[in-house]
Image (cartoon, rainbow, N blue to C red):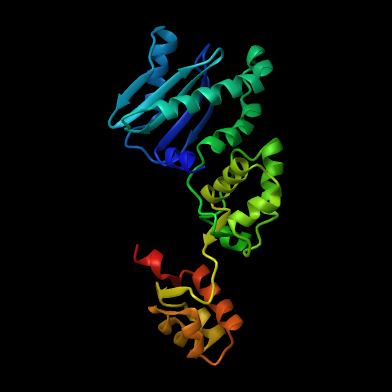
Amino acid sequence: MSDSNDKSAKVRYLSLVRREGGEPIIGIPYREMSVDPDLVASFVLAIIIFENRQLKTFTKEGYVVVIEEGNYVVGLLIVDKVENDAEYRDALIRLIKRFESDYETHLKSWKGDIRPFRQYALSILEIFPYRKLDWELVPRMVTKSEATPDLQANIPWSVGETDEKLQLISGYINGKRTIGEIIDQSDLPEGEALALLSMLDRYKWITLSRRLDDKSILVKVMEPSLLMRGVYGDQLTALVELCDGTRTLSEVCESLPYNMEAVKTVAKNLIDAGVLGYHDLETA
């Protein structure tokens, strides 16, 4: 698991292209690049497909393009410059072999429709998730009112069985369970569950926070809104000011006329609103 996450941190772009004709079948952008990945891919493919030259590695402006050919597709994996690309190449070979096995019928009778292949993004993200997810984090679904205009983008891979699995994993997200607990309870394979959660995180369908407990140390990130002050009154200001990065939540509670559960509830809302943050994360 950790090896996969370490590799995915360097991945910029992954693409599978039809060997005969050069049509893109599936492409997953991971992180921004200083060059257009599609242009890089087009250049490499022109050398391989149209000039019929052998090319295994191509370097461009600090990026390494790892290239592997299957019977029907060419795989391109763009990563940050690394000394040894063997682990990336091995992973790409496995992905190509599985893809050609799963979709051999479609590839043999090519009709130009790439929609059936979008489900394969889940298999790719099992090997290279969008980012490493801490199993102790607690995901919360973004509501429709919170989603507009910047959150909850369409997930392009949410089709067929992948869509069903996204619905399944979403059903376990209640703002209380950790990622580890969700994986255990969903009965989905670990890699698949993490891939699905990484999709939800990438396209901003969830927010991630730490589980709040008595020993949590919070710090003020910004001033609470007038609306929040109107809802909670003067005690809100007192709570926020007591969260100075030195007191545990238990110590904060001792200075307020409320029980721990009430303080936790308000503190959680303040964390979700961005007013409070965890001290170790703010100072990291």
Q: Is residue 159 above or below residue 109?
A: below
Q: Is residue 82 left or right of residue 138?
A: left
Q: Nearer the viewer, residue 135 or 201?
A: 135
Q: Is residue 148 visible?
A: no
Residue extending furthest bottom?
A: 257
| Quadrant position of residue 243 | bottom left
Q: Is residue 152 visible?
A: yes
Whole-percent x, y for residue 38 in the image: 42, 28
Q: Nearer the viewer, residue 95 or 190?
A: 190
Whole-percent x, y for residue 28 in the image: 50, 34
Residue at horizontal 58 percent and vertical 83 percent from the top: 260
Q: Is residue 159 left or right of residue 223?
A: right
Whole-percent x, y for residue 161 in the image: 71, 37
Residue extending furthest left?
A: 61
Q: Is residue 184 left or right of residue 200?
A: right
Q: Is residue 263 above or below residue 188?
A: below
Q: Is residue 131 above or below residue 78?
A: below
Residue at horizontal 63 percent and vertical 23 percent from the top: 113
| Quadrant position of residue 177 | bottom right
Whole-percent x, y for residue 238 in the image: 45, 87
